[in-house]
Image (cartoon, helix red, strand yellow):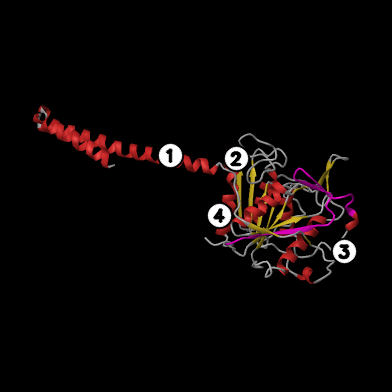
Amino acid sequence: MTRLFIVFKFIINNWLSSSSYRMEPLKSKATLRCIALVSLIGIPVLSCKQKEPHTQTRENESRQPKTAIPFVAGKEIPIWSKSVPDSGLIKGTETYNDGMVSNVSHPTITVFSPKGKNTAVAVIVFPGGGYNKLAIDLEGSEICKWLASIGVTGILLKYRVPASGPHYDKDCHCEKDPVKPLALQDAQRAMGLVRARAKEWHIDPNKIGVMGFSAGGHLVADVGTNYRKRAYAVTDEIDAMDCRPDFGIVMYPGHMTFHTSKPYELNRTLPVDSHTPPMFILQAGNDPVDSIQNSLVYYIALKKAGVLAEYHIYAEGGHAFGLNESAQKIPDWTELPIADWEQLVERWLRTIRMIPK
């Protein structure tokens, strides 16, 4: 800015000493106005150029993988202190392969506590996998680590699979209900367990939410409506705890149009009413696995019931994504607007007064 003023002053002085200064008054004024205009135009141009490197740096930083600050992850904790209800329905040995867990017969939670700032908020995370397996890393532990980085206790629920909720059956090529709602049982029990141990884990018992991806998104809606009665026989004091979540975060849900006969109708097993907790919903319009209809009918039902709900739809993004990548290996996925979804979630948690502004 100083250099520009010196140059401008030099031009004016030279012009005043030249013969052109002895022009007619009207022409002189016009010339002065022209020079002044040029100088004013030059200022913002220089200013913009000075800001360009900083802007570029911020853009480059935003494309870097999202990393979490230090957290404390506890050991896996069985959610059932005695026998697991309907335990005979899950056969086979639990296996882990490339981020996916199969044949879970002994459900657990893992607590990821913030190291440093703690908002006293907790979120129980339900990974997706069609109720037949669990994306335990991409939609589970990675999400819990991010939650801990913003001062929220992330709690990973490894619920029972397969066929623990509404699922696709390859034998009949159709969607089927579970013999018993094992995933709902585990979600209800996990809610009660976290409330019962809230003080121990530095959690406010009135600030415990749930977050789910794909089939886990359906499970959020399930426990968010079916919380008045346990889906299993009550056994101890943990089952006496309230299992209604204080809020829910639903990411690209599935199974929301099962058991329907009309357009824009919600699955009748999800009885949304005015007591359903506030919900955040997000999905890509080009989701090739669970169509946008799933999140749309849920949002419509929430609005009709007067539930506080926020709904975000993006043109692109596909299905099955976490913080830094898509399981579908979509090229340049991190460049898409949907890749910054966690910023919307954090802001929403502020607007519903769960975490401080």
In the rendered view of the protein, which quadrant contains the N terminus? top left
Q: Relative to residue 297, is residue 7 drawn left or right?
A: left
Discs 1, 2 touching: Cβ within 8 Å = no
Disc 4 versus disc 2: nearer the observer: 2
Amino acid bearing label 3: Ser
Q: CA distance from mark 2 to mark 3?
A: 44 Å
Examine the structure image and report whether residue 98 is included in the region drawn in magenta. yes
Q: Relative to residue 187, is residue 278 drawn left or right?
A: left
Q: CA distance from mark 1 to mark 2?
A: 21 Å
Rendering coords of residue 257 (x, y %)? 74, 46
Amino acid bearing label 4: Arg
Q: Relative to residue 341, is residue 105 drawn left or right?
A: right
Residue at image mark 1: 53
Most extreme residue toward the top, as rendered? 19
- Residue 303 appears in the figure: no
Rendering coords of residue 54 (x, y %)? 43, 42
- Residue 87 appears in the figure: yes
Q: Please tell me which of labels 3 and 1 falls first in the chain.
A: 1
Label drawn at residue 347: 4
Q: What secondary structure is found at the residue carrying circle 1?
A: helix
Disc 1 versus disc 4: nearer the observer: 1
Discs 2, 3 touching: Cβ within 8 Å = no
Label drawn at residue 83: 3
In the rendered image, the vertical position of residue 31 relative to residue 132, given as above or below:
above
Disc 3 versus disc 4: nearer the observer: 3
Magenta residue span: 89-116
Rendering coords of residue 270 (x, y %)? 74, 55
Q: Classify mark 2: residues with Cα within 10 Å, few (<14), some (14-19) or many (20+).
A: some
